[in-house]
Image: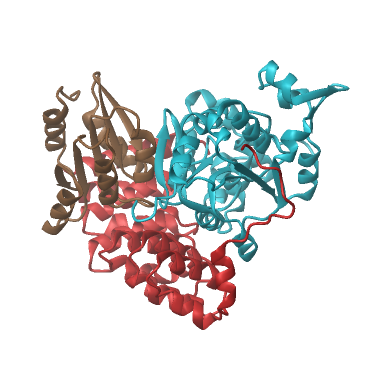
Chain colours: A red, B brown, C cyan
Amino acid sequence: MGLKKKVEPIADVSDDFEEKREHPRTKEQLISDLNSSDSDVRRWAVRDLSGQKDAHDAFIYRLPQEDDPTVIEALFSALEHDMTQSHASQVITMLKSEHVQLRNGAIELMQQNPDIFAANVNLLMHDEDPDTRIFCVDIIGAVAHIDAVNWLHQFALNDDNENVVGTALDKLAEIADVSTLDILQTVESRFPNHNYIQFVISLIRNQVRNADE
Amino acid sequence: MKTVMIVDDASTVRMFHKMLVTSPDRIIEEAENGVEALEKAIGTNVDLFLVDVNMPKMDGYRLCKEIRLNEALRAVPIIMISTESANQDAERAYQCGANYYMTKPVDADTLKSVVSAVIGGEANE
Amino acid sequence: MNSVALDKIGAADFERFRSMFYRKTGIHFEDSKRYFVDKRLHERMKATGHTSFKGYFTYMRFQASGEEFQNLVNSMTVNETYFFREEYQFEAMTREIMDELDGYRPAGEDLRIWSVPSSTGEEPYSIAIYLIEYWKGLAHRDVELISSDIDSNVLASAKKGLYSKRSVQNIPLPLVKKYFKEINGQFQLSEDIRESVSFTLANILSGSNMKQFRHFDLIFCRNLLIYFDDESRKKAAHVLYDAMKPGGYIFLGHSESMSRISSMFKVRKFGDVIAYQKPLAGGA
C-alpha cells in the first residue's frame, strides 16, 4: 500500500463516461437530459450543451422548473456567455421569482452583461414592485457601465421607497463623484428622519470632499 | 466579550448596524454573504448573527439553515433583517431557524434593545 | 519620456478602493498594507496612463471587459511557489481529512488526489512527502496522485524534479536529506517521489477535455482561480465540482474563497483551515 506509481497516460476513464458514449449524445438527447430525474445527469447535460447555439433557450426554459442548487448554478453559468436581448426579458422576469437563487442568478447575469442591462434599466427603474427596483439597484452596484452613477442619482432623487433610495446610496458610496454632491441635499430633504439615509449621505459627502482630484 | 456577526452585502448597512450595536465588550465581525459568514463563523465563537435576506451566492434563509445544521453554532441567536415586509417572509425566516425578524429600515432603538436583550450589555450612545 | 508624478492616494480614496476590492474578491487589505497596495496601484496607474487615482479608479471600475481589474488583482497576488507552501493545508490533510475520506470509501478503492496547477511540481511533491511522512492510513490504502498544468514547459520541469535552495527552504532539514540529493547547489528529488505523481497537460477551462478528470477525493487548486475573471471562475468551479466524488474536499489558495464564486460546496473548517466539501450523496 502507499503512493501508486504513475501511469502514463492517465488510465482511468469512468464507467459513466463509457456509458455515455454508448448512447449518442445528440443535442436532442442532451436537452432531454435536462429533465432527467438525476441531478448529476442534468448538470452534465448543461455542461455538454454549453456553447452550443440555441442551448440558451433550453436553459432559460429549464430554470424555473429546476430545484437543485448545483444545476441552477450550472445553468446560470452557461447563460453568461452570448446572452441576447430576447433572453434578457425572460431573465428579468426571474427577478420576481419567489426562489432567491433564481433572483440572485438573474442579478448576476445582468451584472455580467452591461449593455443588455442598460437597454432594460428604465423598465426596471419604474417597476411597481420596490423589491424589483432594489434588485435593479443591486445590478447597477456591480455593473461596469459608465451610466451607473447617473442611474443611481435618478433613483435617489425620484424613488418613493426609502429602502430603494437607501440601496442606491449604498452603491453610490463606492462610485459617487462630485456630481453626487449636487443631489445629496435634495435627497436628504426627502427623508429627513431616516437614520440610515442620513448616515450614508454624510459618509458620501466626506468621501467625495476628501477625495484627491 | 461577546461576538456579533453582521452579514449583509451592502457595506454601508454593515457600517451603520455596526455603529448602532458596537460597545467595548463586543467584537463585531462582518461578512458579505452567507458563504463568507460560514467561513468566518465555523469553529469560532459567535454570540449573535445579524443576517440580511438578499445576498449574492448564499442568501439569508439558506445561511440560517446552514447555521442550524452546524453543531457548534446551532443555538446561536439569529436576527433576520429584510426589505420584504410580507408576513410570509417572517414565517419563512422562523422556519429557517431565525429567532427574530425585522424589516428595513431598522429602527435604531429597536435594534439596540433587541441585541442587548439577546447578548447583554449596552451599545455605546 | 519623463516620468510623470503620480498623485498620492488619500485615505478616503484608499477606503473606497479597499471596500470595492473586498466586495469583489473577499480580500481585505489591513491598514498596515498601505505601502504594498499603494505601490501596486501606482504601477497600474502608470501602466494605464493615469496620473490621478480617481481617473484610474473610474477607468478600472467601469471597464466592460474587466481586464484592468484582473491586471490589478494579479499584481496584488504574490505567487511564489516552493515546497510546503501554505503548509497548514497539508497538515489538515494528513491530520484529519485523509482519515475522513478513508472512512467514506470501501476497502480496496484508491483515494485520488489532484493538484492543479502543478506549476514546477512543488505542490504535488509536497503532498506526496506529507502523506508518506504523516499519514498512517497509507499502510492500508493506496493513494493516486495526479497533477496538471496548462504549460508543457513547466510540466517538463516538474518531472525532472530539480530544485533551488530557495524552493526547499521550508522543508525540515531531515526531510530534505531524506528525499533530495544535493547536486551543485541544487536539490534533486528522489525518483521514488517523482514516480508517485502522474503529470498531465490540461486546461481547466477547455470544456470537454476536462471530463476525463473524475472521481477525485481531494483537490488542491491553489492560486489559480484568482487569475480568472468571474465567468471563468464559475466554470472552473463546476469542473472542479464534477471532478470530485461526493464527500470530496477542495483547498483553494489562502487569499481565495468560494464566497465570491459558488455556494455549491459545503464550508468545512479544520481548526482555522478552510476546506470546501462536495456534499455527500443524498444531502447537503
B32, above or below A50, in the image: above
Q: In which quadrant of the rendered view does residue C243 lie?
A: bottom right
C98, above or below C62, in the image: above
Name the foreground residue: C56 vs A66: A66
Given the current orientation, which residue lies at the most extreme bottom position? A28
Task: Tell me where residue A56 appears, x and y as whole percent.
Answer: 48, 75
Could one spot residue A131 in this view of the protein?
yes
Could one spot residue A177 in this view of the protein?
no
Q: In which quadrant of the rendered view does residue B1 lie?
A: top left
Name the foreground residue: C54 vs C222: C222
Task: Tell me where residue C229 appears, x and y as whole percent.
Answer: 57, 53
At 42% across and 59% down in the image, what residue appears?
A108
At 49% across and 52% down in the image, what residue appears?
C245
Q: Which quarter of the image is occupied by the N terminus of chain A?
A: top right
- Left or right of B44 on screen, residue C72: right
Task: Tell me where residue C126 appears, x and y as whole percent.
Answer: 65, 32
Given the current orientation, which residue lies at the most extreme top position? C173
A128, above or below C214, in the image: below
- Left or right of A194 on screen, residue A117: right
- Left or right of A5 on screen, residue A64: left
Q: In which quadrant of the rendered view does residue A33 lie?
A: bottom left
Task: Tell me where residue A132 appears, x and y as whole percent.
Answer: 28, 63
- Tally of numbered discs: 0
